[in-house]
Amino acid sequence: MVQNLQAVSDSQSEQVRESAASGQAYFDRIMAEDSRIEPRDWMPEAYRRTLVRQISQHAHSEIIGMQPEANWITRAPSLKRKAILMAKVQDEAGHGLYLYSAAETLGTPRQKMTEDLIAGNARYSSIFNYPAVSWADMGAIGWLVDGAAICNQVPLCRASYGPYGRAMVRVCKEESFHQRQGFEILLELANGTPEQKQMAQDAVNRWYAPSLMMFGPPDDDSPNSKQSMAWNIKRFSNDELRSRFVGMMVEQVEVLGLTLPDSEIRFNEETKMWEHGPLDWNEFREVLAGRGPCNAQRMERRREAHENGAWVREAAAEYARKTAAWSAEAAGVAS
Ligand code: BYC
């Protein structure tokens, strides 16, 4: 009996090894063809973990990222501005939901991802730990932060994991509208009174360096980039994307009639890359360690919102239970 069980177990592990070997061959072929992996396909565990890490961090960023702008909805200077800002903040919630759904297809429930965030065990983008202190910050966030997001996320539309790439297509379309609305806020202020122009310039000065840091640490200090690029998740390195972003902004800032607070921006003809002045990577590390200007406040608000939303989750679960019970009952009556 024991021998039979041993034989069954040996043959099962043999099957697992065979399916892993053929799964790996399939996965390697998909990578070589630059094609897509879908949720039910075999994938290496490390690939799955990397995707859950990146997609859940991205989802958390969208949700936490609602806070700095939601803070200005009640103080928007006109009804039109209020309506636009509300639509933008709602879009960010939608992005969070697409991304949590994409991450769930990898086998990690949204509840677990949320619990990790609430417990302070998950990352979200460094940028959302800076305060939005004036109305012009709504312009700078839209122009610089959403601009950086577009630069980073357009290549992610081609990410090798199907649900992530498809979610990013929709996110990027909406981010383009967000960037335009930010640019337009700054343009109006820059063409307003001298005080308004100064307010716009101050906002650009404060958000410029943090938005460059959104792309992550310099390539030499980016432990995940190489593998993520080999797996066709990331298509460009952190520094390549940062350089591209600087090139975009340097042109657009002229249209605004403002300046970027960086006298070292230049195009390097040899490397064909835009270069910028030094960034304070110590500050970046501090923010990542939870010691940025708003980390504590952002987390406190997120926990509060989660607790206040408990009744919605309970009501939705109860509705789902009752609907399933009614369907089962109706099926019983019909048969
Ligand atoms: N902030 O090896 P690296 C938005 C972490 S939402 C915090 O280069 P990777 C928007 C990194 O996670 C914007 N942490 O990592 C929303 C890693 O730590 P772990 C969010 C950062 O993954 C509302 C370590 O540093 N966008 O746009 O290859 C309103 C080493 O880094 C940051 C996304 O999430 C950072 N800035 O590259 C408006 C895009 N940078 O995980 C706008 C998707 C790095 O090993 N994500 N770290 O503990 C990505 O493209 C990549 O994950 C990153 C980092 C470029 C961010």
Image (cartoon, rainbow, N blue to C red):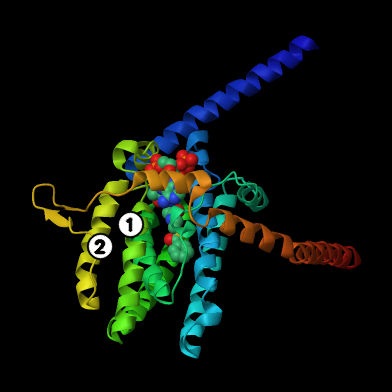
In the rendering, at what x and y percent does residue 189 appear? 33, 82
Q: Single out the residue that lies furthest toward the bottom.
A: 79
In the rendering, at what x and y percent does residue 30 appear? 39, 42
Q: Residue at x 25, y 62 (%)?
A: 261
Task: Tally the marks.
Answer: 2
Q: Is residue 325 visible?
A: yes
Q: CA distance from mark 2 to mark 1?
A: 9 Å
Answer whether labels 2 and 1 touch (C-beta < 8 Å).
yes
Q: Single out the residue that lies furthest toward the front.
A: 195
Q: Nearer the viewer, residue 84 or 266?
A: 266
Secondary element at tag 1: helix
**59 w.r.t. 188: above or below:** above
Q: Which residue is mark 1?
A: 209
Q: Nearer the viewer, residue 183 or 173?
A: 183
In the rendering, at what x and y percent does residue 235 appear? 32, 48
Left or right of residue 277: residue 127:
right
Residue 261's tag is: 2
Q: Residue at x 39, y 70 (%)?
A: 142
> Within 10 angstroms of label 1, few (less than 14), some, or many (20 or more) residues?
some
